[in-house]
Amino acid sequence: MMVFLKRITKIAWQGISRNKGLSFQVFFIMAIAVFALSSLFIFRDFSLFLIEQVKKKVDVSIYFKKNVAEEQILLVKNEVAKLSKEIESVDYVSEEKAKEIFIERHKNDQLYLSALEEVGDNPFLPSLEVKAKSPLFYAQISQFISEGPFRDLVARISYSENKKVIDRLYRLTSDIQKAGVVFIVFLAGLVFLINFNTIKLTIFAYRDEISTMRLVGAPSWFIRGPFLIQGVIYGLASILVIDIFFGLVSVFLSPDFQEWFFGFDFQNYFYGKFWLILFIQIISVLILGVVSSLLAVRKYLKI
Amino acid sequence: MISFENISKIYYMRSHPVCALNNISFKIEENEFVSIIGKSGAGKTTLIKLLIGEEKPTEGDIFFMGHRVNEMDSSEIQWLRREVGVVYQDYKLLSSMTVRENVEYVMQVIGASDKDISRDVPQILDLVGLKERQENFPAELSGGEKQRLAVARALCHRPKVIVADEPTGNLDLYNTFEVIELLKKIHSLGTTVILATHNKDIVDNLKERVITLEEGRLINDQKKGRFIL
């Protein structure tokens, strides 16, 4: 077995080193394939990150009437928190806290601060800020408050004001996810086809040699073997080059990336998911290189 | 050793049947030197393709050392091809490998050890006069050298039979003589040789068995034959 492996590896390496132009073309296409598939994976995670970021910006605020006691509000808080596992957080914002937030937010805007002074009294209502895991759940929270036992304590709920935005956001995020899957499947298919055809053309160039190998009695695996090993070599070389590229990008461009892509920390992400990305890359090149070679050689082994 | 029994081969060209071989029967014994002669299209190459399992007969049976060739599966066919060394008119060399690697490849195919390969290959290349060209690629060789390499490749694994299909078709007189001398030498060492040719001089000088084909039919089979077409 070792002798067999040594021999087919030697033949595979000779094939690469003696046809540098052709080998470079296959390597180049394979590297593009690895880059595209890795980017698709990163893109998928980036879009999930983006969706999470947008979701975080959406919440529902329940404003209570002026005279409602803090204990009662905290009771409502507990009830809302118990409503479902879908509730991510429920934060109580007192009148004073609301005023502080307003002052902090508009500290550079004298007009707002003067207006607040004009009013004199604290015009803010105590509130609960509810965050749910899915935007879809806000309607349920809103219904629970407006139709439940606490409805008399509540002045207004921001959900009805934000309903359109929340619904659109939900549709948008689920559309992005669906489109992402379609896009990834389409692009992965395209990458496979381009790669398969490149390998097919390379093996087509060897068709006469393959038939000669058959005519001198070479077993199928002695003929397939070098092509499979070449596929693996091209694939591993492509992974190495592309991962070095991603590594350099993560080191030198990560701060810029964070600025351009809404705080997406590429360096942290790449290092954190390196082994998973590498695993996906290896599986991809095995499918691309080995399966393509197997399918392409099969045709010429029928002699 | 080899037996063709009532072999017919019909090809279909645009759905019209063309009979390449018509009810052919003959036997070849061990250590024979057999020339198969006939005009172009007489069926010589078809006969060789049937013998090495490259084609299947339409009718009849072919036996090689007791094995029915036309019923062999893919791995048995590959075994058969390792037992029969073939020299082609168009050489069929591995163009991406050097002279030495072409011969080594066949020895690797039969599972020879590295030690045997490094011992035998230089000897074989010396025998065919290509020792000095062993690091050259086939494209860098002359027609005669290519054919000698094809012979070296066919005999390196010591097959029981060597089949040469028009091996001198592309060669000048000098190289033709060299290749035939080589085949005679291989035969004298105990290997069965089947030579398909339409070269009258070669056949007449060999004074060995001659099978004559005409339009797919066997018309003559003589022990010490001559070119009669």
Image (cartoon, rainbow, N blue to C red):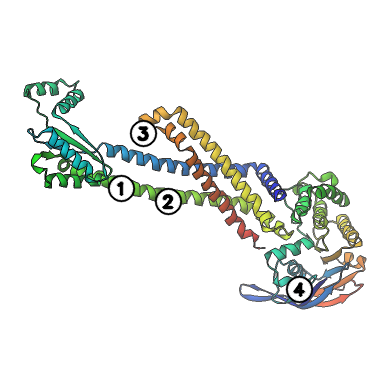
Question: Do the dots labelled 2 and 3 sit on one chain?
Answer: yes
- Secondary element under disc 1, as helix, strand or loop, is helix
Counting from the top left corner in percent of width and height, residue B168 is at: 82, 60
- Which badge, 2 or 3, is on the more N-terminal residue? 2
Counting from the top left corner in percent of width and height, residue A27 is at: 57, 42
Question: Do the dots labelled 3 and 4 sit on one chain?
Answer: no
Q: Residue B62 carries which label?
A: 4
- Which badge, 1 or 2, is on the more N-terminal residue? 1
Residue picked out by circle 3? A261
Packing grade of label 4 (10 A; few <14, some 14-19, many >=20) is: many
Report the front residue among B195 and B175: B195
Distance Cα–Cα, label 1 vs label 4:
68 Å
Image quarter of residue A223: bottom right
Q: Residue at x 15, y 30 (%)?
A: A94
Mark whose residue sits in front, 3 or 1: 1
Q: What residue type is labelled 3?
A: Phe
Question: Do the dots labelled 1 and 2 sit on one chain?
Answer: yes
Q: Are marks 3 and 1 in contact (CB under 8 Å)?
A: no
Q: Which chain carries label 1?
A: A
